[in-house]
Amino acid sequence: MKTTSDLGDLRGKRVLVRSDLNVPLDGSTITDDGRIRASAPTIKGLADAGARVIVCAHLGRPKGAPEAKYSLAPVAKRLGEVLGSDVVFAEDTVGDDARAKAAALEDGQVLLLENLRFNAGETTKTDDERAEFAGELASLADVFVSDGFGVVHRKQASVYDVARLLPHATGDLVSTEVDVLRRLTRDPERPYAVVLGGAKVSDKLGVIGNLLGTADRLIVGGGMVFTFLAAQGHEVGKSLLEADQIDTVKGYLDRAEKEGVEIVLPVDVVAADAFSADAAHEVVAADAIPADRMGLDIGPASSALFAEKLADCRTVFWNGPMGAFEMEPYAAGTKALAQALVEITAQGALTVVGGGDSAAAVRQLGFADSDFGHISTGGGASLEYLEGKELPGLTVLEEGDA
Ligand code: 3PG
Ligand code: MG
């Protein structure tokens, strides 16, 4: 894959950069700017080289038409603050405003286009329609830099098709992310543990299946763990349960045993009588959840067990919170897990926090990015990589220029 330094002298050139600036918003307030900060160095590097930088990105999942609440305007402002220079914002993506502002750019200036997904051509499954929109994007620029790691698993116009129309290079963020994932998949230092959490086991079946062949330990928490507990024959009360996945999970438990992969499940949980911060809640044994209660976090004995299972690990990948951490009474498990990773990071282990949501969680709980080996900007993308899937946004870069 070519890097930006292979693009030659960029002074005066129009460079289209695909970044992943999909940040969580509360109204127009950005609650975690991690993806903006992670994207800034590539953009700044290009601007410093004298390029006229045209950044494109998505926010949320609008349905192919403008919707004010998904505007990238607040992101343009924050990006300018992070870069230390104003970012011009276009009110559309490939329309009159975008074309005029792209044409007026001076060397070293940065323009952010409005949300790519306000255009149906960005995400459509119809190749011709995607190619047509990609053509309009490509006409704004001379070269393309792919730096939106969080979207490389998406076959979308700004990720895949545009790279087939312009000379292109891989941005520094994508290169860094891929390097880390390679270290996890090619001969990781052992013991290698993977910690999975989050709500749905069905989102992670593929990756679990693949990890049974590479990881030494699989530690499970979060909402998805109740399907594991049910597969072991336990009552899970009103906890999240994907009943249709119980058999699949049983199959994984058997396979893990055969392949010598240790599966670590919670031994206690915080069980509440409603999904609410002020619900009555207590710690119960994981095999004795009362029928009228739901598990919303792992309990203290589980936190201690997980920490013990991580203590000797040399490589850890973590995706997904251990509980409903947004509510204070259910945040302790996620916090304890993060703390266990911080400690082994200090001892030289490679720890990778995978994903926008998990990354936002650790920052919200007061941890610093530098407490971990690597905080990935792409949850779905890193899981698909670990699953061994082909990522269209990377394949197209490997293909080379058209
Ligand atoms: C993410 O938030 O995971 C990435 O920005 C990709 O977004 P998407 O899942 O809506 O494609
Ligand atoms: Mg996501």
Image (cartoon, grey):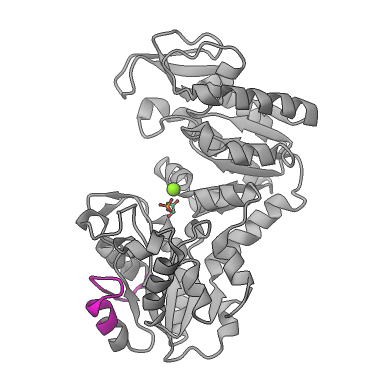
Image height check: is 381 above or below 282? Answer: below
Quadrant housing the N terminus: bottom right
Image height check: is 395 above or below 26? Answer: below
Corner quadrant of residue 179: bottom right
**Does the stretch in magenta take in 36?**
no
Residue 397 pos. (x, y %): 59, 71
Q: What is the magenta range?
A: 83-100
Residue 158 pos. (x, y %): 43, 68
Residue 224 visible in the picture: yes
Left or right, 223 with reference to 318:
left
Q: Which residue lies furthest to the left in this view?
A: 68
Left or right, 20 with reference to 231:
left
Which residue is at a point 23% across and 60% down the rendered structure image? Answer: 66
Which residue is at a point 34% across and 52% down the rendered structure image? Answer: 61
Corner quadrant of residue 169: bottom right
Corner quadrant of residue 44: bottom left
Q: Which of 185 and 160 is in front in this view?
A: 160
Q: Nearer the viewer, residue 330 or 73?
A: 73
Left or right, 21 with reference to 99:
right
Which residue is at a point 30% across and 54% down the rendered structure image? Answer: 63
Residue 395 pos. (x, y %): 61, 65
Quadrant housing the C terminus: bottom right
Residue 389 pos. (x, y %): 62, 52
